[in-house]
Image (spheres, rainbow, N blue to C red):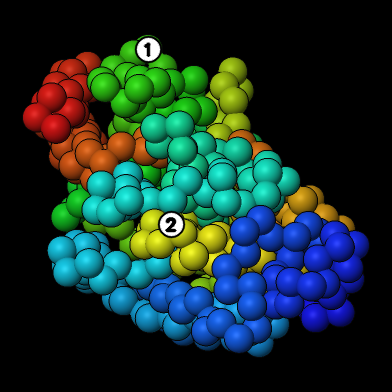
Amino acid sequence: MNKKLRIAALTAAGLLAVAGCGAQPGGSPTTGSPATQTQSAPVKLTIWHYWDGTNADTFDAMVKQYDDAHPEVSITTSMVPNADFMTKLRASASSKTLPDIAIGDLVWVPQINQIGTLADLSALMPAATLSDINPALTTFGNIGGKQVSVPVSANNIGYMYNKTLFQQAGLDPAKPPTTWDELLADAKTIKEKTGKPGYELYTQAGDNGEGLTWNFQVNLWQAGGQFLNADNSAAAFNTPEGKKAVQFWMDLINSGASQYAPWGTFEKGQAGSAAEGSWMVGIWAPDPPFDFATAQAPYPADGTPATNLGGEQAMVFNNSDATAKAAADFLAWFLDPAQVTSWSETTGMLPVTNSVATSSTYLDWVQNTQPLLLPYVQQMKDAHARPNTPLYPAISLAFAQQMEKIFAGQVSVDDGLTAAEKAVNDVIAKG
């Protein structure tokens, strides 16, 4: 917010005597804003994130913009590599040097909640700001009745396809599949006509399992199933709905349209299509490896549309009342429509707020500048979040390791689902 708007907001609230007090997005005065006297030293905030490149440069520029407009606060950002982030956070908790804001992968939120005391942002941020956030993203940060995180970026999984291979197979690139049956038929045709897999599946667990699990959850939800029960105390995928999703994958594999193989065939131009994240649009935009297009994730004719959310969430450590309030004020500013629009357009990440995702300003930008993002933006309304339990990484790996055996043809669908259910419940039981 510029200085003129801040002064106007203060005048309207009758607070001109309190020099340096910030304003919330929309012109509401900050409740208990830190460092309200001009003579006071600014409240110093530290922010850790793992972004690099354009994302880091854009974020740092936005922090400077906020700093320049808010002399009562001084913010320092630090880039901590993704692989080191959690280890460094735990070390800083032991030495009582936690940052004021940690921005990390959304699946880390429950674990970070155990590392240090996180502030309840519902008590520190405007209700209007929180209610504007995509519900699935706020639900993820709701732990123990507190809002311990807010999203600052988002992505999801959609359908991406190779237009050249579609044409070689005699398919119309302007008509991507919208249902599972259409996807299977198109994939079989591509395999038959080009000799290349028609649809790439993430069939191997790898080091952490999450690639397989994250992709499979989309089809599970589309079939009407759930991954864990409501309180995350037990597996919930070994059901008719879960079996339907697995059988869809096996139909693809058994037909030859998909294969049990390491991930990466589609990205090399050697497969007709795949479930790919929205971030690939931005990565490939400057220099596409082949002529590609995007569409919303196909779902069963008798099912429901769904996709899986990714992205980063910001958490505020309750290091002091002053820093917590100042940190929350910064995040409220960051989630203001003007900032969300600028951040999304510059980074290619999807808007985390409904007002921006549906605004004519942003949608016009998408249509004119990055139209391949549009299907991902449109399906944000159907997005689901993964279970917000600190055990999720271990659960994901245990699940994927058993499911891989099904896709490799080592066990039946029923036996594999039963084994995956037991593996997941064992992880939960051990805590």
Q: Quadrant of the C terminus?
A: top left
Q: Is residue 295 above or below residue 72?
A: above
Q: Is residue 365 left or right of residue 392?
A: right
Q: Is residue 227 left or right of residue 203?
A: right
Asked if marks 2 and 1 touch (Cβ < 8 Å), the reply is no
Q: Residue at x 9, y 29 (%)?
A: 430
Can you give x and y, in whole percent of width and height, for residue 29 in the image? 75, 60
Residue 132 appears in the figure: no
Q: Amino acid at mark 1?
A: Pro
Q: Residue at x 17, y 69 (%)?
A: 95
Mark carried by residue 315: 2
Disc nearer the start of the sequence (2/1): 1
Q: Could you say whether the residue bearing mark 2 is in a helix, strand or loop? A: strand
Can you give x and y, in whole percent of width and height, for residue 135 in the image? 60, 38
Q: CA distance from mark 2 to mark 1?
A: 38 Å
The residue that disc 1 covers is 240
Residue 48 appears in the figure: yes
Mark carried by residue 16: none
Foreground residue among 8 and 331: 8
